[in-house]
Image (cartoon, rainbow, N blue to C red):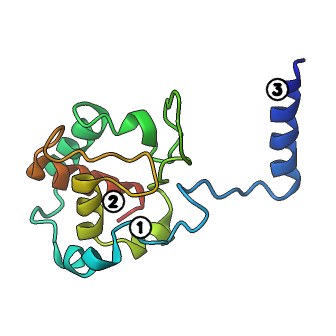
Amino acid sequence: MSLTSKRGATCVLAVFLLGGSVVWGADPAVLKPRVPLDRIEEAKTWRNPFPVTPERLERGKKLFHGKGFCVTCHGRDGKGFGNIPGLRGKLPRDFTDKAWQAKRTDGELFWILKNGSPGTDMASFIPLVLTEEEAWHVLLYVRAFGGT
């Protein structure tokens, strides 16, 4: 067994012995807003214009797993364990975190899709990758990870 394998096994064992719970957020302060303070109040007023329907959730899912390639970093299950070669920052956001889901407004999440997330590897996706309408559909799907 290599030294790297031994270290990995030791970390897994430590997590198991400590109760098996680990917070895998994009930063230690998972609930910290990612929208700059001078823009957050405006972003919080933005509302998703598309109500949740099975068809819209399916469209958001297809965009998440396809054109938007969100799955690459956030993973198939939304937990932030995607296939991330050369990740420079911290782990991507865990969309299944109910506390984070409750804290962030749709407008804040839309702002991040439009502008990226300062201090993380999250880049801007609107309009280079997704249209605004597509982004709102992706956010419907992201909300579904948190059971909302």
Between marks 2 and 3 in the image, the one whose residue lies nearer the viewer: 3
N-term mark: 1 or 2: 1
Q: Is residue 124 above or below residue 47?
A: above
Name the residue at 41% across, 33% down: 72
Q: Amino acid at mark 1?
A: Gln
Picture coordinates of residue 84 (x, y %)? Answer: 50, 32
Q: Quadrant of residue 76?
A: top left
Q: Amino acid at mark 3?
A: Thr
Q: Mark 2: few, some, or many residues within 10 Å (few <14, many ≥20)? A: many
N-term mark: 2 or 3: 3
| Residue with the mark numbered 2 | 143
| Residue with the mark numbered 1 | 101
| Residue with the mark numbered 3 | 4
Instruction: Determine if residue 77 is in view.
Output: yes
Q: Secondary structure at mark 1?
A: helix
Q: Amino acid at mark 2?
A: Arg
